[in-house]
Image (cartoon, helix red, strand yellow):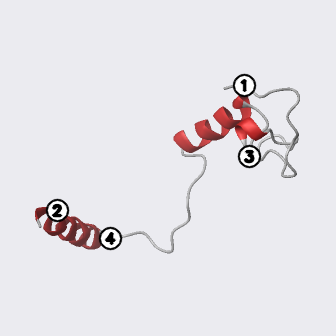
Amino acid sequence: MTAKLTEKPSKMPCPQCNKPSAEAFKPFCSKRCADVDLGKWLNESYALPSQEPLDEEAIEQMIQAQEIVTKE
């Protein structure tokens, strides 16, 4: 997918380089910036915050609950 040179840029800037974003790659300006962002997610450079880590008992309870749901 390539952006056309005649496309109007959106009002929101690219989150990677701050250039105007292109409709074809929204919210990014190009495939390169979209790929850079994807790479950051895949390398775990970005992380969603959590309030507190789960302990092993809580994880085990979640697994058991999921197994019960999938059996039904």
Kindly identify which numbered label has been placed on residue 2.
1
With respect to residue 17, does 68 lie above or below? below
Residue 34 position within the rendered picture, expressed as x and y whole percent measured from the top left: 68, 36
The disc, 3 or 4, on the residue closer to the chain's N-terminal end is 3
The disc, 1 or 3, on the residue closer to the chain's N-terminal end is 1
Q: Quadrant of residue 3?
A: top right
User: Callout 2: helix, strand or loop?
Assistant: helix
Give the amino acid type for the residue marked by disc 4 in the picture: Asp
Q: Is residue 46 left or right of residue 65?
A: right
* Residue matched to label 3: 27
For the residues labelled 4 and 2, the Cα–Cα distance comes to 23 Å
* Residue matched to label 2: 70
User: Callout 1: helix, strand or loop?
Assistant: loop
Residue 55 position within the rendered picture, expressed as x and y whole percent measured from the top left: 32, 70
Kindly identify which numbered label has been placed on residue 46.
none
Residue 35 position within the rendered picture, expressed as x and y whole percent measured from the top left: 64, 33
Give the amino acid type for the residue marked by disc 3 in the picture: Pro
Q: Kindly indicate whether the residue at mark 1 contacts the one at mark 4 (C-beta within 8 angstroms).
A: no
Kindly identify which numbered label has been placed on residue 55.
4
